[in-house]
Image: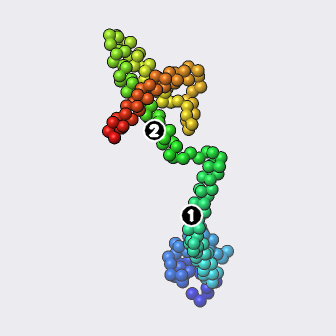
Amino acid sequence: MANLDGLLAHELAKLLSCNRRSVSRWAKDEGMPKNPDGTFNGPACVAWIVERIEGRLQEVKAEQPQPGGEWLAAFRRERFRIARLERKERQGRLILKEDVIGKWAERVRLVVAGLEVFADRLPGALVGKPREAMAQIISDEVRQLRLGFAQEGEYCPAPFDTDEAAAAIRGVFDRLKPAVLATEGAGHEGDQAES
């Protein structure tokens, strides 16, 4: 092995303390320098391996987070989120959670009141009616209640845009208002009686 300029694959493998298949794979797939006659130049192959190892070390070093890099990236992401929320608030597109909860609580209260009216009114409306008529009455009442719940509101677009739907919604709320006011008045009178 005195001539390091014309080594065979198994001789280079022995010099590098690896197997012959590794040398062949490096030459074929990864660009290890090879002489035109198929032999290997030992010093050139060692320089290639050293260059390759140094390149990998640089890649690993570049992949490692820089001191403060992670918190800085997190800080920038959070700052971006805050700026986006502030922009939406200035544009009037940001809705406070408390407002939404209050509006939906009002709708649920109206539906519950509607169900109570429905339960009080329905038995009398169904007495003596045939089964098909009962089904139609119940279906109409449920539809009216559903339309009332699906009303257009501050945070809810109108589900449809017809005069019939608007009239139906107004009808439901016109019928529900006395019942809602009565239940609210009864609750307040009871509170006052306990005081």
- The percent position of residue 169, horizontal first and vertical second, equals 51, 24
Residue occupying image coordinates x 41% and y 32%: 184
- The percent position of residue 28, horizontal first and vertical second, equals 60, 68
Q: Which residue is mark 2?
A: 105
Task: Name which of mark 2 and mark 1 comes first in the sequence.
Answer: 1
- Asked if 52 appears above or below 135 in the picture, the reply is below
Q: Amino acid under label 1?
A: Ala
Image quadrant containing the N terminus: bottom right
Q: Amino acid under label 2?
A: Ala
Residue occupying image coordinates x 54% and y 21%: 167
Q: Which residue is mark 1?
A: 74
Residue occupying image coordinates x 33% and y 18%: 123
How many residues crowd mark 2 within 10 Å: few (<14), some (14–19), many (20+)? few
Q: Secondary structure at mark 2?
A: helix
Q: Quadrant of residue 43?
A: bottom right
The residue sitting at the right extreme is 36
Protein image colouring? rainbow
Image quadrant containing the C terminus: top left
Q: Which residue is nearer to you in this view: 59 or 15?
A: 59
- The percent position of residue 17, horizontal first and vertical second, equals 50, 81
Q: Which residue is nearer to you in this view: 86 or 179?
A: 179
Q: Which residue is nearer to you in this view: 61 or 82?
A: 82
Q: Secondary structure at mark 1?
A: helix
Instruction: Give the alpha-carbon distance from disc 2 to disc 1, as whole Å.
Output: 37 Å
Query: Is any atom of residue 66 visible in this view?
Result: yes
- The percent position of residue 121, horizontal first and vertical second, equals 37, 20
